[in-house]
Image (cartoon, rainbow, N blue to C red):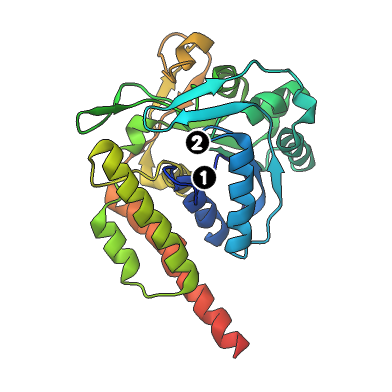
């Protein structure tokens, strides 16, 4: 069983905001091979305040017993379609970051046992490193969702990179100061689309309150995404990263020596060159298997567990 810390920018439930962090959280909770030690919140999809609030509400709405730790950083999302956001100068108060302190505490309690999945800004990884410069050697592995190696096209529209670009110094630290790093880039995640066929499979499983709760969120985001990009499918970026963490055999390793500077990472770009930072950029082997795994764990297993609970309570 893997000991996992999930660091995310969940906005499931907010209008015109992505849902993949929330689905990745459910995937981890429902995965029998995961011991989820805690959830950390950070900014990117929206401000830290909105993300933290939505994560607490999601945990409560879904009846999940988890501790949620708030990160640090002032950030405003103005235009989600074009990822128009406002960065604020870092006040440097990294020791006030409860999420970063939690990561450091757990890494010292369970050295080389923890897998860290980070799917928002890299602020908490940066602050954890500032608190403990050896943190990168104390984790078993780090899986990041973010970065691009080329433009992200949905039809004729380009989506800008978000997770690395909102905190480029954090991204640089995550890439260069942590060991066993894998990055699920935007480009690689786009190999797996979630469309109406996949949604129909979910609906065919049956109805219950919690499944309906999530299905409604997916349908809402698919409509909003269609309006923004005129594209019929969505990409569940963070779920793909979570699936890689638990099922690396569904991917092919592809190592890249990353020399990206903070300036490169302002645009989220991963630049290859001569460097000691040898990073795995996994390649999806079969997009259907990835979607099937997500449906099996997030919906089918959850549905069966709820049915068992219902029988047990009768």
* Residue name at image x 59 percent, y 62 percent: 61
Which corner quadrant of the image does residue 93 belong to? top right
Disc assigned to residue 11: 1
Question: Are the residues flagged by discs 2 and 1 in contact, CB closer than 8 Å?
Answer: yes
Q: x, y (%) of residue 133?
A: 74, 21
Question: Position of 108 compared to 293: left or right?
Answer: right
298 is higher (above) or lower (below) than 111: below
- Taking the image as shown, residue 35 lies to the left or right of residue 204, namely right
Residue 185 quadrant: top left
| Residue at 70 percent of width and 25 percent of height | 127
Rendering coords of residue 170 (x, y %)? 60, 21
Q: Residue furthest bottom?
A: 314
Can you give x and y, in whole percent of width and height, for residue 129 in the image? 70, 24
Residue that carries the numbered disc 2 in the rendered image: 45
Asked whether, in this view, residue 277 is left or right of residue 68, the answer is: left
Q: Residue at x 27, y 52 (%)?
A: 195
Vertically, is 55 above or below 125? below
Image quarter hosting the C terminus = bottom right
- At numbered mark 1, what does the secondary structure look like: helix, strand or loop? loop
Image position, residue 178 (x, y; %): 61, 25
For image coordinates 31% across by 71% down, the residue present is 204
The answer to which of 220 and 190 lies nearer the viewer is 220
Relative depth, front residue between 37 and 216: 216
Q: In this orientation, which residue lies closer to the viewer: 233 or 128?
A: 233
Q: Of the residues under marks 2 and 1, which one precedes in the sequence?
A: 1
Q: Is residue 311 visible?
A: yes
Residue count near mark 1 (Cα–Cα under 10 Å), binned few <14, some 14–19, many ≥20: many
Residue 15 against residue 305 in the figure, above or below: above
Q: In the structure shown, which secondary structural element does the residue marked by tag 2 occupy?
A: loop
């Amino acid at each position: 069983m893997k000991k996992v810390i999930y660091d995310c920018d969940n906005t499931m439930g907010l209008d015109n905001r992505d849902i993949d962090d929330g689905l990745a959280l459910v995937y981890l909770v429902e995965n029998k091979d995961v011991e989820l030690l805690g959830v950390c919140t950070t900014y990117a999809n929206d401000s830290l305040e909105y993300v933290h609030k939505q994560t607490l509400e999601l945990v409560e709405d879904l009846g999940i017993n988890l501790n949620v730790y708030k990160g640090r950083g002032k950030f405003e999302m103005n235009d989600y379609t074009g990822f128009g956001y406002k960065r604020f100068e870092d006040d440097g108060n990294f020791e006030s970051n409860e999420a970063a302190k939690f990561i450091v505490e757990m890494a010292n309690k369970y050295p080389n046992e923890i897998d860290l999945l980070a799917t928002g800004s890299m602020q908490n990884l940066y602050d954890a490193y500032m608190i403990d410069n050896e943190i990168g050697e104390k984790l078993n592995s780090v899986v990041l969702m973010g970065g691009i190696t080329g433009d992200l096209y949905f039809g004729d529209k380009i989506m800008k990179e978000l997770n690395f670009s909102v905190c480029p110094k954090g991204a640089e630290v995550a890439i260069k100061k942590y060991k066993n790093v894998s990055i699920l880039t935007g480009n690689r995640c786009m190999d797996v689309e979630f469309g109406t066929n996949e949604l129909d499979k979910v609906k065919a499983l049956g109805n219950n309150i919690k499944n309906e709760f999530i299905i409604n969120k997916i349908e809402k985001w698919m409509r909003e995404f269609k309006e923004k990009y005129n594209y019929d499918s969505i990409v569940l970026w963070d779920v793909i990263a979570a699936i890689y963490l638990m099922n690396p055999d569904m991917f092919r390793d592809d190592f890249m020596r990353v020399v990206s500077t903070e300036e490169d990472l302002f645009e989220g770009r991963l630049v290859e060159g001569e460097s000691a930072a040898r990073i795995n950029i996994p390649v999806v082997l079969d997009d259907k298997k990835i979607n099937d795994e997500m449906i099996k764990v997030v919906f089918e297993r959850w549905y069966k567990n709820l049915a068992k609970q219902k029988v047990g309570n009768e």
